[in-house]
């Protein structure tokens, strides 16, 4: 028997918290299944798709194009959002939707199986309630063809899928959902009084339209900024600041008008400071470990080149050796050092790193003793130690 294979866009949907809804009210749960299925059926028909089957509270659909699959998914979520706005909270429900493009096998009776189906079903749970997630393959196909804003969730491991898949989240809040408003027919104004009234009405309408236009621009600006906020959200930690700055750079490239926007500059400055703090921490701990290991080469890499031109390197290396012997004699390890504070100037060119060392007294009491501050200077985008070395270890009594 020859099996039929084809490339298809697969949309998989599932009702959020369905088990809890079923436990609380079975009749309501069945009503929600029918409501969800009705929304999906209409969208699938509108965009020339095909419903393959219901799977419990989920629905598996097939489309011949990724564009139609994404448009149908957006239409479904729009319809459910409209429904939820007009009912009580107890009557509301939400779907998750996942979409992937892949090879499928068509079985007797029209059912489909294969990689495309499996991946779509694994992507769906990654969507937020009321949200849509798509694979990188779908993103590449719909980019510049469907008016959507997305944010990458990164490469993800999917259950029973041998390779990682990059997942994108569609930002539905950043989209304009246009509704048609019926416009009444205008009558021709012929009398002088009517003409005056008409002028007043038209003037008022112009003012209203100008106000709506300005409000629309502001709303569009807020939506665009929200896209950037979503894009940098996964990179909020100091160690991920570099990735956040890359996202901001890409955003500004796509939206040049926001390059000097106050909020974009604030966000960029915030992540620049986080990146500097992360780099300084890395450098400071590298320096401490190098001293403990008596690693002259590593120490010399971290010192301001201007200082190296003024001070004999043999003198520096001898200080490294003395400091290493002293710290090891005291039984101090790199793990006993802690950064207590980092001060960075406004230009982010100079910094002070304050450290403390954790010591145990003969009686077993743990003490934290501050060290002399370390000064760092930024030269050609690299941080270098900028003061007399080892004052912290040679001049302080432990």
Image: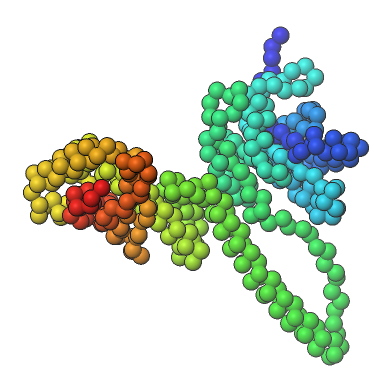
Q: Position of residue 147 (x, y in %)?
A: 63, 50
User: Which of the two residues, 116 or 236, is positioned nearer the viewer here?
Assistant: 236
Q: Which residue sits at x=22%, y=37%?
A: 329
Give left or right: position of 313 versus 336. Answer: left
In the picture provided, is 368 more to the left or to the right than 189? left
Which of the pair 340/139 is nearer the observer? 340
**Front residue of 304 and 60:** 304
Question: The N terminus is located in which quarter?
Answer: top right
Check the image and report above or below for 73 versus 6.
below
The image shows residue 333, relative to residue 371, as above or below, that is above
- Report whether 112 appears left or right of 235: right
* Residue at image coords 28%, 39%: 332
Report the residue that reaches farthest toward the bottom: 192
The answer to whether residue 321 is visible is yes
Q: Position of residue 57 (x, y in %)?
A: 80, 33
Task: Specify the farthest residue to the top.
Answer: 1
On the image, the x and y values in percent for residue 94 come to 76, 44
Which residue is farthest right?
Answer: 27
Horizontal arrangement in the rendering, residue 276 relative to residue 291 (left or right): right
């Amino acid at each position: 028997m020859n099996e039929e294979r084809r490339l298809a866009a697969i949309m998989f949907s599932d009702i959020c918290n369905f088990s809890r809804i079923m436990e609380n009210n079975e009749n309501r749960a069945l009503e929600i299944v029918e409501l969800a299925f009705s929304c999906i059926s209409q969208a699938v028909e509108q965009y020339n798709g095909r419903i393959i089957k219901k799977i419990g509270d989920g629905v598996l659909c097939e489309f011949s194009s990724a564009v139609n699959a994404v448009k149908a998914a957006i239409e479904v979520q729009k319809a459910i959002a409209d429904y939820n706005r007009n009912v009580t909270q107890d009557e509301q429900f939400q779907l998750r939707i996942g979409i992937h493009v892949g090879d499928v096998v068509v079985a007797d009776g029209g059912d489909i199986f294969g990689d495309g189906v499996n991946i779509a079903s694994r992507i769906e749970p990654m969507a937020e309630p009321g949200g849509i997630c798509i694979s990188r393959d779908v993103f590449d196909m719909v980019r510049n063809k469907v008016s959507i804003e997305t944010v990458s969730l990164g490469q993800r491991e999917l259950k029973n899928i041998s390779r990682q898949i990059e997942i994108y989240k569609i930002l539905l809040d950043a989209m304009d959902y246009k509704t048609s408003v019926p416009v009444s027919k205008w009558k021709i104004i012929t009398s002088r009084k009517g003409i005056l009234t008409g002028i007043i009405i038209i003037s008022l309408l112009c003012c209203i339209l100008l106000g709506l236009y300005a409000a629309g621009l502001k709303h569009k600006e807020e939506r665009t900024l929200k896209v950037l906020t979503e894009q940098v959200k996964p990179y909020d930690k100091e160690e991920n600041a570099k990735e956040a700055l890359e996202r901001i750079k890409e955003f500004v490239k796509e939206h040049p008008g926001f390059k000097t926007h106050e909020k974009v500059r604030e966000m960029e400055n915030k992540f620049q400071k986080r990146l500097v703090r992360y780099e300084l921490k890395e450098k400071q701990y590298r320096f401490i470990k190098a001293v403990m290991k008596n690693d002259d080469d590593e120490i010399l890499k971290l010192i301001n080149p201007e200082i190296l031109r003024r001070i004999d390197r043999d003198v520096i290396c001898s200080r490294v050796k003395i400091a290493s012997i002293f710290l090891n004699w005291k039984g101090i390890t790199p793990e006993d050092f802690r950064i207590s504070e980092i001060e960075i100037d406004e230009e982010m060119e100079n910094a002070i790193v304050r450290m403390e060392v954790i010591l145990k007294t003969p009686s077993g009491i743990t003490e934290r003793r501050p060290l002399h501050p370390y000064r760092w200077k930024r030269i050609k985008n690299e941080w270098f130690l900028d003061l007399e070395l080892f004052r912290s270890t040679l001049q302080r009594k432990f």
